[in-house]
Amino acid sequence: MSDKNYTFAKGLETIYEFNKKDKDSLPPVDKWNPDFCGDIDMKIMRNGQWFYMGTEIKRPAMVKLFSGILRLDSDNCYYLVTPVEKVRITVEDAPFVATTLISEIKDSIHNLYFITNVNEKILLSKDNPLEIKIDKETEEPSPYILVRKNLKALISRSVFYELIELASKKNIDGKEHLTLESNGEIFRIYEY
């Protein structure tokens, strides 16, 4: 086994052991600062599919494992990070896709939850806000929710339509806005 393959295997073994101990938390990738080991032929498509060397990774557990060690660094590149190595991958748009919306009222507070393609449940809140980018040429919206730190999920078209159905008009600072309410906060979607 080459040194590089051994290092990669050792790093994945560390992540696997971490996941076995605590299935509900993510590895502390922001605390790890291994040497950069180069680019690998891994790509996350806009629809949330993961590919390695041109072949789709079809095992959800493997995608979940890799998504837990994903990091976006200040150079605006995405990396898979273990305690012993850091490899750069390609992300077509956002690394996650919000595929399901759950609307709940608990203790008279309305909460909106998004479920991602890797089964993470994200509460629309001050810590996990919405962002809508408008394509300058097509004027088509691309809505996102912050998943963690600086990693976002593209909100699928069907979920975005559900959000629009839940939205209401509010006058904020003398201007009409289309808004959503979640976790006691008002989120502006659109200004008229």
Image (cartoon, grey):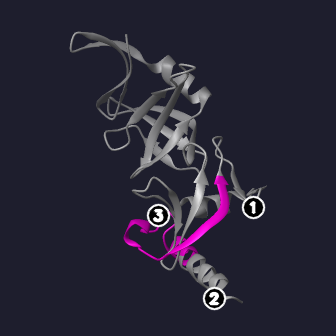
Is residue 105 a member of the stretch shown in magenta?
Answer: no
Element at label 1: loop
Is residue 37 a member of the stretch shown in magenta?
Answer: yes
Q: Give the image location of residue 71, x and y in percent.
A: 47, 59
The label number, if any, that marks residue 113 in the structure image: none
Mark 3 or 1: in front is: 1
Element at label 2: helix
For disc 3, the neighbor class at 10 Å (few under 14, some 14 to 19, many from 20) is some
Q: Name the residue type under label 1.
A: Met
For disc 2, the neighbor class at 10 Å (few under 14, some 14 to 19, many from 20) is few
Camera-side residue of 112 and 87: 87
Question: Which residue sits at x=73%, y=58%?
Answer: 57
Q: Which residues are magenta?
A: 15-43
> Does 113 sit above or below residue 180?
below
Residue 94 occupies quadrant: top right
60 left or right, relative to 115 = right
Mark 2 or 3: in front is: 2
Q: Name the residue type under label 3.
A: Leu
For disc 1, the neighbor class at 10 Å (few under 14, some 14 to 19, many from 20) is few
In which quadrant is the N terminus drawn? Answer: bottom right
> Does 145 sit above or below residue 81?
above
The label number, if any, that marks residue 53 in the structure image: 1
Q: Name the residue type under label 2.
A: Asp
Q: Give the image location of residue 55, x and y in percent.
A: 78, 57
Residue for badge 3: 26
Sequence-wise, the earlier of marks 2 and 3 is: 2
- Structural distance between the alpha carbons of marks 3 and 1: 26 Å
Are circles 2 and 1 on residues that touch, CB within 8 Å? Answer: no
Camera-side residue of 21 and 94: 94
